Image (cartoon, grey):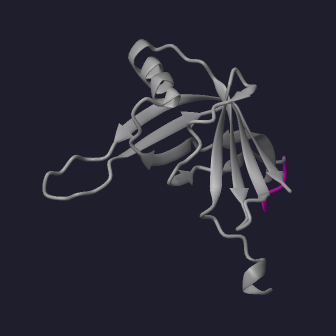
Amino acid sequence: MLYNDLVLGFRFGVFFFAGGLVPNPLDIRFQKVSGLSGKVTTREIQEGGQNLYRQKVPEGITYDNLVLERGMIVGSPLNIEFNVALSMFTFAPSNVLVTLLSGSSIPLGAWLFIKAYPVRWSTSDLDASQSNVVIDTMELAYTRMQILRI
């Protein structure tokens, strides 16, 4: 495998679909995305008379929360949505598409998060002794993740 064949993870876009359909063109740039994982949970069953092993059967699927980080932005529709959710306990789930791009901005793969809603919003520390960018961290729970490979 050549180095050129490796997929690099620093070029991506995050697309929020209001009402599940209309993309929000303003909130697409993020510094970091994490939580791209799902896991099948299992249950062990002891068979009668079988003492050497137990059967594992699938029970369900669990997902990590989707975590997005970016520099603080003023006047963002996403900020308004998070503020409404966390201050009024009113939720408007939307679909979120995270798309991994090649160096030529061609989509290589994607993760679709269905019925995502805010569960955490935090801002980095403010420190007068340093000149760091203020980072907002947004965390979303969702119903289901669909992995799309192109």
Image side of residue 91 versus residue 142, left or right:
left
Image side of residue 93 versus residue 83, left or right:
right
**Closer-to-camera residue (102/136):** 102
In the rendered image of this protein, does residue 52 appear above or below residue 84? below
**Closer-to-camera residue (101/93):** 101
Overall secondary structure of the magenta section: loop
Q: Position of residue 105 (x, y in %)?
A: 73, 60
Q: Quadrant of the C terminus?
A: bottom right
Residue at the location (43% across, 43% down)? 137
> Quadrant location of residue 45?
top right
Please give the count of numbered marks on the rendered protein.
0
Q: Quadrant of the N terminus?
A: bottom right
Image side of residue 28 versus residue 52, left or right:
left
Magenta region, residue range: 48-53
Q: Position of residue 34 (x, y in %)?
A: 56, 52
Q: Residue furthest left?
A: 129
**Closer-to-camera residue (91/24):** 24
Residue at the location (50% across, 38% down)? 139
Q: Position of residue 72 (x, y in %)?
A: 38, 42
Residue at the location (25% across, 47% down)? 125
Q: Residue furthest bottom?
A: 2
In the rendered image of this protein, does residue 108 appear above or below residue 13? below
Residue 25 visible in this rendered orientation of the protein: yes
Residue at the location (80% across, 44% down)? 58
Image side of residue 114 versus residue 117, left or right:
right
11 drawn magenta: no
Residue 41 visible in this rendered orientation of the protein: no
Q: Position of residue 122 (x, y in %)?
A: 37, 38
